[in-house]
Image: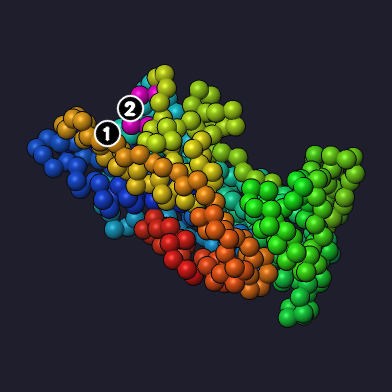
Amino acid sequence: MPRPLNIVVLGGSFSGLSVAHHFLDHIIHQLSTFENAPTYRVVLVSPSTHLYFNVCAPRALVTPNLIHTEDAFIPIEPAFARHPFNEFTFMQGWATSVDTSARRVTVELRHSKSQTIQYHALVIATGSSAYSPLYSLHGTHEQTMAELRDFHRRLEHAHSVMIVGGGPSGCETAGQLAQYFNQRRFKGKIPKTITLLSGNTRLLPKLHPAISKKAERQLKRLGVHVVHNLREVSNTLNGDGSSNCILNNDMTITSDLLISATGVYANSQFLPDHMLDENGYVVTSPETLRIHGPGIGDRVYAVGDCAAYSKNYVLDVYDAIPVLMKNLHNDLLSHEIEALEDACYVQNPTDTQLIPIKRFGGVGVIYGWRVPSIMVYLLKGRTYKVGKAKGAVGRGKNPYDSPG
């Protein structure tokens, strides 16, 4: 019996898991329906055996009393146990190179030497990483768990915390820290001087100015010091564990703890330069999610935060998956059925952001519409969606599909 053709999915986070589940649940058994037809196998490659449900990171980094560290990490392989071994393979490792002319991916395995995988179709879903290891995986899940536990230990005795970055992660983190350590209901905690450094004229610069003002008011009521128009140039670590933040006005601020919440970068270092834009994101057709270019060949795609079409919103993952999978299905059938119609992705031009700040609220927009503070609590802040993590891993579901 001939070997199955590999559908290689690089990345075991939200987009990669959703691609793998969709293919196995909805596509694989619609293929291979005629005599001598090829069979297929999904090969999912990820540096981590667990998904880090980093939706909850701004609260999980505060203390395990709010979110148990273990609850933020969901194992991947058990979620695919219902599929036979000849249809699904999980590989823990890092893609180190892609040779599109030979249609091969080289993977550095965690517990053995590098391995080269031949692909029939390739989906790049490697996502993006935050500059701080508290907000995203930087290797295995054990490494991120260790970072969180070490941060908890140091935070318990810290008197001052500097958060660099006035975007959603910075605002959420400042609010969650201030709520836990500086409010009366949590007696016995060492109060923290919390400073949020914004490199812009206002917080949340991608959202409406009224939302920025509301977020700043909420943070100031929690005792957070908000400083605008200053950017971090570099930082150094002192012998006692404190950090020096060197600013673009030549000032240096020392704090017991420094958290970098300054955005993300694409996990695309293993790809050749001609597949990337000037910011390191994978150049993808924004309609079909295929990757085109000299020598790239057929059946190569990118989806999610690593792709240039994405605004790094969750909608750009889950709204795009059905389009990608329809076009992958078409491309696999093209040898037997001609003139199949492509699906086209149409990006939602509006913003959707929910930013919990205080105990029962925060700020946010859904499809461009501002939502009341209490709705931010009900839709996200109450549980930080931790109860939806197993669905994201087990079925590739969007954790924002329903409240909770």
Tell me the crowding category of disc 1: few under 14, some 14 to 19, or many 20 or more residues within 10 angstroms, Cα based.
some
Residue 335 falls in which quadrant of the image? top left
Q: Is residue 270 left or right of residue 391?
A: right
Q: Amino acid at mark 1?
A: Asp
Name the residue: 54% across, 46% down.
Answer: 312
Residue 61: x %, y % from top left = 66, 62
Q: Is residue 189 visible?
A: yes
Q: Is residue 106 left or right of residue 30?
A: right
- Among the two numbered marks 1 and 2 on one chain, the one whose residue lies closer to the N terminus: 2
Name the residue: 84% across, 43% down.
Answer: 247
SS of the residue under disc 2: loop
Cβ atoms at labels 1 and 2 below 8 Å apart: yes
Residue range corresponding to the magenta coloring: 296-301
Q: Is residue 213 left or right of residue 121?
A: right
Q: Is residue 37 magenta?
A: no
Name the residue: 31% across, 40% down.
Answer: 343
The single residue placed furthest to the top in the displayed view is: 294
The single residue placed furthest to the right in the displayed view is: 251
Q: Main secondary structure of the magenta part?
A: loop
Residue 341: x %, y % from top left = 25, 36
The colour scheme of the drawn protein is rainbow
Compared to residue 104, the image places residue 11 above or below, namely below
Provide the residue designation for mark 2.
298
Compared to residue 336, the image places residue 166 above or below, namely below
Q: Amino acid at mark 2?
A: Asp
Residue 62 falls in which quadrant of the image? bottom right
